[in-house]
Amino acid sequence: MNKKIIEQLQNTYPDKTEFMPSQVIDAASEVGVAETGIYKQMQDLPKVRRGVYSMAGLMSKQLNKDVVQQIGVSSVSSNEVYIPEQEKTFVQWGNFSDVLKIVKSQMFYPTFITGLSGNGKTFMVEQACAKAGREYVRVQISPETDEDDLIGGFRLLKGETVFQKGPVLKAMEAGAILLIDEIDRGTNKIMCLQGVLEGKPVLVKKTGEVVTPKAGFNVLATANTKGKGSDDGRFTAATLLDEAFLERFTITIEQSYPGVNTEKKIVMKHMEKFECIDKEFNTLLVGWADTIRKTFEDGGVDEIISTRRLCHIVQTFSIFGKRDKAISLCVNRFDDDTKEAFLDLYTKVDATVTGTGEYPSTIFSDDTKTEEDDTRVNPY
């Protein structure tokens, strides 16, 4: 529709968006635009009732274009899109090979990755992109995350108002992997991603621009739940995600904690990184964590020692040089009863700290599972 006609209608009917063809033809006549083809163009618009059509979309788009011209709005990019570096501490295990295949496929294949905290979900996606040489954008979700954070919004830059594209649009334009981290922390404010999860062009309402995803664009999301909330209260910030929203993910990958052999490799990588190699401590730590997880599965404790926490213990050990102090400082976050239970268990297996030094057989069990079978705690 001709811009002059829309402007004339806005001036004549400032509060109106629904018109009959005769009104539009009159507006065209007043601004000296030929009437040819106007009736057919009207028939392509949403029909409100007999002989009346909605021009709200055209008017909104034209208004946004006018705003862009009036205040000098431009698009601002940043270095949020990048190819991650390969980390020396990363160990390939479990679902990594599947995620790598998805990343390498260049297909639009929305993937939901769920599992308990600290088992390497986000790190796995990042390192898959690093190995595949794929550009990557990570978006951290919180209850306050909204369309302005994801799609973009107006910003004041060097005294000028500009429209800054958000990470979602940047990933789409670059054909990059968009990682939506902890998606189950979001509210209905992230429903603006509905169209993005269909792999279709997105209308930027604030500018009227249509952004079409470049080949290779894909969305992967991580979460501690399956978008149904947390019944046991472990993840109180986890929300109920809309069923139609969840249905747009093609597959769901369940990520558990690694098995003993793999976790030993991960812990050793961190010992090498922090220059505090202690093979015995490695074995004791992993066995201690594995025993706690088994007890958790049986309902004996309410908390778990995650792989991430084991890495924290290694880093703390590199600073203080004492096994028991490193563990104590890193389990202080738990309630008193849980903390004491965890510390008591460790003192019973390590002869170098206060305790009997008697090692439970579970800690020195011969774990010969293959990488494909490398699963421990699966909350589902």
Image (tube, rainbow, N blue to C red):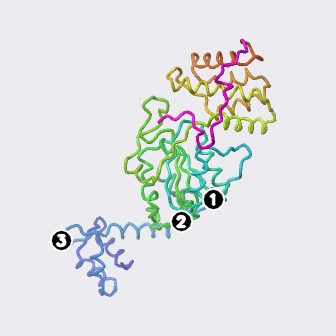
Q: Is residue 53 left or right of residue 137?
A: left
Q: Secondary structure at mark 3?
A: loop
> Marks 2 and 1, how far apart in space?
27 Å
Other residues around mark 3 within 10 Å, as few (<14) / some (14–19) / many (≥20): few
State the residue at coordinates (29%, 67%): 17
State the residue at coordinates (71%, 51%): 86
Q: Residue 279, image x and y in percent?
A: 78, 30
Which of the two discs, 3 and 1, labels the residue nearer the N terminus?
Answer: 3
Q: Amino acid at mark 3?
A: Arg
Q: Amino acid at mark 2?
A: Val
Q: Quadrant of residue 349?
A: top right
Q: Residue 166, image x and y in percent?
A: 54, 57
Point out the frontmost of discs 3 and 1. Answer: 1
Which of the two discs, 2 and 1, labels the residue nearer the N terminus?
Answer: 2
> Marks 3 and 1, how far apart in space?
50 Å
Q: Residue 123, image x and y in percent?
A: 63, 45
Point out the frontmost of discs 2 and 1. Answer: 1
* Residue bearing the label numbered 2: 73
State the residue at coordinates (50%, 70%): 69
> Cβ–Cβ below 8 Å for labels 2 and 3?
no
The magenta segment is: 356-380
State the residue at coordinates (54%, 60%): 165
Q: Quadrant of residue 267?
A: top right
**Between 59 and 70, the one nearer to me in the picture:** 59
Is 290 magenta? The answer is no
* Residue bearing the label numbered 1: 135
Q: Secondary structure at mark 1?
A: loop
Marker disc for residue 254 = none
Point out the frontmost of discs 2 and 3. Answer: 3
Task: Please count the marks in the image.
Answer: 3
Other residues around mark 2 within 10 Å, as few (<14) / some (14–19) / many (≥20): some
> Marks 2 and 3, how far apart in space?
39 Å
